[in-house]
Image (tube, rainbow, N blue to C red):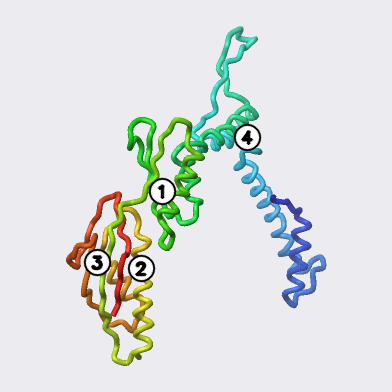
């Protein structure tokens, strides 16, 4: 909550702060320090007025007129009209509903739209530990059906996360809707690297760097998103950026989906996901 302070309160506090943190002590009438502070005080008070107006006009509880209409646009719910009888014209006319009625309808609109639509389901699923992203597809099993592909974070048990997401979807979905929660098709990646170091690097440091490279690659590939391709130059940067003591490296083996592949870029299908299976660094 924003509490407005008067110009006098701002001036007094400013003088106290200056006295505490500087050698200036003369704040009598006519003093330069006091004149500067008093000149700035009203400006800060006007900023408080502006901030309070922004706060009130930006909340459903306090907004009125055109500001309330702007909130309605956020929910794709413009202010509707109502038909009332005009005694002067002796006829029915269309008039915009008043602020209180519109405010109430917008408050109910919040509960309506965040119930069983895709965004509501995504919000329910993304709060589950281990969920990196949720990809939704409509009508995958006919009318009234949809599928969610769960992209899990590296280090979590994918099947356990999928089960939790499925439970959350079943709790949030609309009646009569058939959900299907599944995991991406995994494309395992296996590789063996040989690092080349500066001659001055000790054996202990070499082993430590090999371990760091291995951990970095597991983390790098483990967080690949759905449909993300293997880009060789990005892979090279990941290895070389681990430590400046690495001069070069050689890829001795590279397998995708248990098949040997060339050292080049490799694309996958949009429902597939590259995941590390075995990474050796020598």
Residue lying furthest bottom: 200
Q: CA distance from mark 4 to mark 1?
A: 37 Å
Q: Which residue is mark 2?
A: 218
Quadrant (top left, top right, bottom left, bottom right) of the C terminus: bottom left
Residue at 49% of width from left, 44% of height from top?
Answer: 168
User: Which of the numbered marks, if any, corresponds to residue 78?
Assistant: none
Q: Mark 1 or mark 3: which is in front?
A: 1
The residue under the point 65% across, 38% down is 61
State the CA–CA distance, disc 2 to disc 3.
Answer: 15 Å
Secondary-structure class at tag 1: strand
Q: Residue at label 4? A: 64
Label 1 to label 2, Cα distance in Å? 22 Å
Q: CA distance from mark 1 to mark 3?
A: 27 Å
Percent position of residue 12, x then y? 78, 62
- Of helix, strand and loop, which one carries label 3? helix
Q: Which mark is residue 134?
A: 1
The picture places residue 231, in percent across and down from the top left corner, at 26, 63
User: Which of the two discs, 2 and 3, sits closer to the camera?
Assistant: 2
Give the residue at mark 3. 232
The residue nearer to you, when weighing 35 against 273, is 273
The x and y percentages for residue 182 are 37, 47
Instruction: Using residue 209 as the reference point, say whether residue 262 is left or right of it.
Output: left
Task: Judge depth for marks 4 and 1 and give the one in front.
Answer: 1
């Amino acid at each position: 909550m924003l509490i407005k302070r008067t110009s006098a309160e701002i001036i007094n506090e400013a003088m106290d702060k200056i006295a505490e943190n500087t050698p200036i002590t003369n704040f009598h009438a006519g003093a330069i320090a006091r004149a500067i502070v008093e000149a700035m005080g009203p400006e800060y008070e006007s900023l408080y007025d502006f901030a309070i107006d922004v706060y009130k006009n930006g909340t459903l509880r306090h907004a009125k007129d055109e500001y309330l209409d702007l909130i309605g646009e956020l929910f794709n719910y413009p202010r509707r009209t109502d038909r009332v009888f005009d005694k002067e014209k002796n006829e029915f006319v269309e008039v915009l509903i008043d602020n209180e009625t519109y405010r109430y309808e917008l408050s109910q609109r919040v509960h309506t739209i965040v119930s069983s639509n895709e965004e509501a389901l995504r919000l329910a699923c993304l709060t589950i530990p281990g969920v990196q992203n949720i990809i939704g597809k409509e009508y995958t099993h006919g009318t009234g059906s949809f599928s969610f592909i769960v992209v899990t974070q590296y280090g979590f048990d994918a099947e356990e996360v999928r089960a939790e997401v499925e439970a959350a979807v079943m709790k949030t979905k609309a009646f009569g809707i058939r959900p299907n929660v599944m995991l991406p098709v995994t494309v395992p990646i296996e590789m063996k690297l040989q690092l080349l170091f500066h001659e001055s690097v000790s054996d202990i440091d070499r082993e430590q760097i090999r371990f760091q490279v291995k951990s970095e690659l597991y983390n790098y590939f483990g967080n690949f998103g759905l449909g993300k391709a293997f880009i060789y130059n990005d892979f090279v940067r990941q290895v070389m950026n681990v430590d400046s003591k690495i001069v070069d490296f050689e890829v001795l083996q590279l397998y995708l989906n248990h098949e040997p592949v060339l050292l080049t870029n490799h694309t996958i299908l949009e429902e597939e996901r590259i995941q590390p299976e075995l990474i050796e660094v020598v």
